[in-house]
Image (spheres, rainbow, N blue to C red):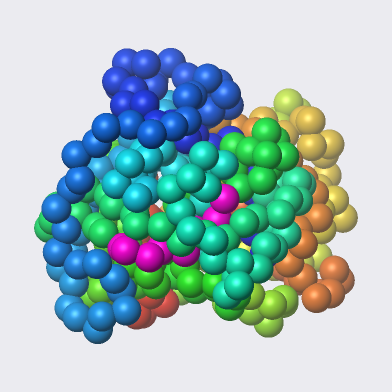
């Protein structure tokens, strides 16, 4: 089940970098025009992930929106419709605005409409198929019949709802990476690019300093998020710095590039010594890495995650978004089931 507390962007116009830098995610999506445009079809050396072939690594350029803290990928449907999608390590699917209905085919016989939750908003997602192209190194990417979701109006109004998900596995529908034929990636905020690979990305010292991906599947169905155990949580509050010790549950951090700020599961309400409104930032220790929130993207929410079979028996969850990830490089190696934060 998908959840999100973010704004996304989607546009058919080629915005210049100066224009993008002054727009928040919310402003950007609400001011965008969606429709067909003339494009250049990018050359690609593959058409479907179904063919069992060795694929070269591919590097995709991304667009950074400073005020929202997100990285966005330009996507072209049916060689005619271009829009931008937030690169999202917290979801598995490619989603698109309603205009994509004119550039895709109905896939509901195989994948019926499903209720998807983004943030605290639930809406019916229509599942479609379309030819998808994206430029990059090694000839770019081209998938002739990709499954994607068209987001409902209420989800777009409340959260933006346009994402390119990087979660590798989903138990109900094919993920973006499965359809592209890749299993590992490196999302680099500094270089503003996304590297996709079939091969292991962690070797030598990087492997030794990487973290095991925490397995959330014992706590609920279809939970394949990129999560890591958290050894220490320190809060910056209006009353000073508070180190949280003797917590009633272990803490797990979910790394979510589609999120601007931070979300605490409602289980935290049993352990927080201050009001949510008093929390002005956080520092998270995951292995030997310290994730420190940046104030320009600090937004804190707390609500019940629709993930767990038992509300009494699951860890505290912190969904860590751009406020922690900006300026970093996140490498996820699905073969070793480890990730690295640099």
Magenta stretch encompasses residue 221: no
| Image location of residue 261, percent across then percent down | 60, 38
At a point 18% along the width and 72% down the height, the residue shown is 55
* Residue segment shown in magenta: 143-150
Q: Position of residue 120 (x, y in %)?
A: 76, 47
Q: Nearer the viewer, residue 247 or 106?
A: 106
Tell me: residue 226, above or below residue 279. below
* Residue at x 79% of width, y 37% of height: 276
User: Is residue 145 part of the magenta span, yes or no?
Assistant: yes
Q: Is residue 16 above or below residue 208?
A: above
State which quadrant residue 335 falls in.
bottom left
- The answer to whether residue 271 is visible is no
- Depth order, front residue of 276/322: 322
Q: Residue at x 38, y 34 (%)?
A: 36
Q: With 95 as the anchor, is 334 left or right in this view?
A: left
Q: Where's the N terminus, which quadrant?
A: bottom right
Which percent across, then down, holds residue 89?
48, 56
Residue at image point 61% right, 47% down = 151
Where residue 71 appears, as percent x and y from the top left, is 40, 39
């Amino acid at each position: 089940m998908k959840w999100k507390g973010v704004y996304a962007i989607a546009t058919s116009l080629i915005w210049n970098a100066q224009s993008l830098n002054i727009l928040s995610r919310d402003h950007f999506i609400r001011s965008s025009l969606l429709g067909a445009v003339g494009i250049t079809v990018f050359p690609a050396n593959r058409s479907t992930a179904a063919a069992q072939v060795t694929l070269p690594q591919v590097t995709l350029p991304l667009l950074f929106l400073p005020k929202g803290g997100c990285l966005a990928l330009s996507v072209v449907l049916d060689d005619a419709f271009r829009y931008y999608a937030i690169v999202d390590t917290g979801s598995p699917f490619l989603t698109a605005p309603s205009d994509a209905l004119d550039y895709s085919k109905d896939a509901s016989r195989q994948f019926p409409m499903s209720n998807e939750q983004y943030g605290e908003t639930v809406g019916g997602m229509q599942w479609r198929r379309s030819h998808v192209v994206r430029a990059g190194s090694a000839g770019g990417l081209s998938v002739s019949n990709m499954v994607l979701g068209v987001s409902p109006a209420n989800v777009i109004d409340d959260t933006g709802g346009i994402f390119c998900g990087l979660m590798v596995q989903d138990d109900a529908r094919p993920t973006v990476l499965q359809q592209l034929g890749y299993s590992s990636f490196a999302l680099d905020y500094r270089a503003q690019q996304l590297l996709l690979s079939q091969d292991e990305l962690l070797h030598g010292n990087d492997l030794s300093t990487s973290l095991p991906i925490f397995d959330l599947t014992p706590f609920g169905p279809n939970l394949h998020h990129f999560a890591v155990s958290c050894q220490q949580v320190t809060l910056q509050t209006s009353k000073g710095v508070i180190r949280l010790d003797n917590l009633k549950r272990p803490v797990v951090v979910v790394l979510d590039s589609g999120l601007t700020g931070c979300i605490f599961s409602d289980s935290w309400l049993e352990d927080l010594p201050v009001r949510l409104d008093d929390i002005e930032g956080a520092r998270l220790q995951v292995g030997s890495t310290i994730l420190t929130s940046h104030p320009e993207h600090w937004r804190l929410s707390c609500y019940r995650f629709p993930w767990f079979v038992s509300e009494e028996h699951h860890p505290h969850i912190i969904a860590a978004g751009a406020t922690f990830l900006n300026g970093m490089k996140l490498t996820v190696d699905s073969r070793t089931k480890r990730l690295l934060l640099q």
